[in-house]
Image (cartoon, rainbow, N blue to C red):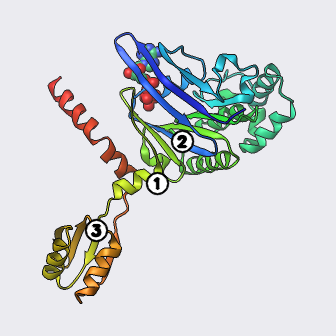
Amino acid sequence: MEATIEARGLRKRYGSTLAVDDLSFTVAAGQVTGFVGPNGAGKSTTMRMILGLDAPDGGTALVGGRPYHSLRTPLRAVGALLDAGAVHPGRRARDHLLWMAHSNGLPRRRVDEVIEQVGMGPAARRRAGGFSLGMRQRLGIAAALLGDPPVLLFDEPVNGLDPEGIRWIRGLLRSLAAQGRAVLVSSHLMGELEGSADHLVVVGRGRLIADTSVAALLATASGDRVALRTTNRAEAMAALANAGATVAAIDAETVTVSGLPAQRVVALLTERGLPFSEVVAHRASLEEAYMELTRDAAEFHTTVGQEA
Ligand SMILES: Nc1ncnc2c1ncn2[C@@H]1O[C@H](COP(=O)(O)OP(=O)(O)OP(=O)(O)O)[C@@H](O)[C@H]1O
């Protein structure tokens, strides 16, 4: 089976709320795709439609080219972590996994393999009711991995976890993608995806805001902005402005330059014999890039909020 998820024109309405509005995107194999948007943007609803838990009012969602309901052994096609609290509290973790494996025709040995893979250890023999959030999360992930599926969905997997748990999940996501799987992971905080996502699908109010590689988004947000330190600020600013750059003085010796790459700034200053001690290309963080991307939407929300 292909390791892909395809959403085409998905739409879902709950009463007067249009939770998902004409949403199309593809999740490719071998990548971690971050699914980002503020609370209520429609991420969970979209994931539920991909997993056949909610019927779309319009559009289609395909896993490996097929609708979820047509998959004969769903756990072998797609694994998901949606709600980590969903296991019966009286049930032992390992028994829960054994039951899942049995009902999907999976060998018992997979249960011990995934218990090992998620590092549950002896806790697997305890009842799920006494589990910490981190352990519940590991159990949910073990269940998602049980059928060794090529497609994986994780809804807010790091929510509420401690730094060690967050680091573990990031490493796991990277290794699942490195094995060629398609991995979709949602978050309402862009910063959580820094260092783990290759691609981003950004949503707001149920609609697609951006579908971009992380590298392209960072390159756009970083722009050609360069910070320059020079002891001859006035002449440096004049020379760079003449070359078409937009320049702004920050302090007596620091200038920001937009519209020229760092190499051009260095070449120009060198040609004119102007002194400089530092030329640094600005690199935006994922959080900055996200703020820039969603600024218009945020302004709109603020205006609406003030009117209300
Ligand atoms: N079962 C439901 N009944 C009514 N409204 C719903 C239902 N599920 C979701 N909604 C509404 O649909 C919108 C999208 O919700 P959804 O949970 O998909 O967003 P989300 O992006 O996953 O948010 P969060 O980050 O808070 O989980 C919200 O306005 C939510 O209140």
Q: Residues within 10 Å of mark 2 (few under 14, many from 20)?
A: many
Identity of the residue drawn at 31% across and 75% down: 264
Q: Residue furthest top?
A: 15
Q: Position of residue 15 (x, y in %)?
A: 38, 9
Would you place residue 95 above or below residue 237 in this image?
above
In this figure, which residue is indicated by the disc labeled 1? 215
Q: Position of residue 69 (x, y in %)?
A: 66, 16
Q: Is mark 1 within 8 Å of ligand 1?
A: no
Of circles 1 and 3, the one toward us is 3
Q: Earlier in the sequence, mark 2 or mark 3?
A: 2
Q: Position of residue 89 (x, y in %)?
A: 66, 23
In this figure, which residue is indicated by the disc labeled 3? 260
Q: Are marks 1 and 3 in contact (CB under 8 Å)?
A: no
Amino acid type assigned to the residue bearing label 2 in the image: Thr
Along the line of sight, which residue is nearer the eye, 12 or 91? 12
Q: Is residue 10 left or right of residue 233?
A: right
Identity of the residue drawn at 76% across and 28% down: 97
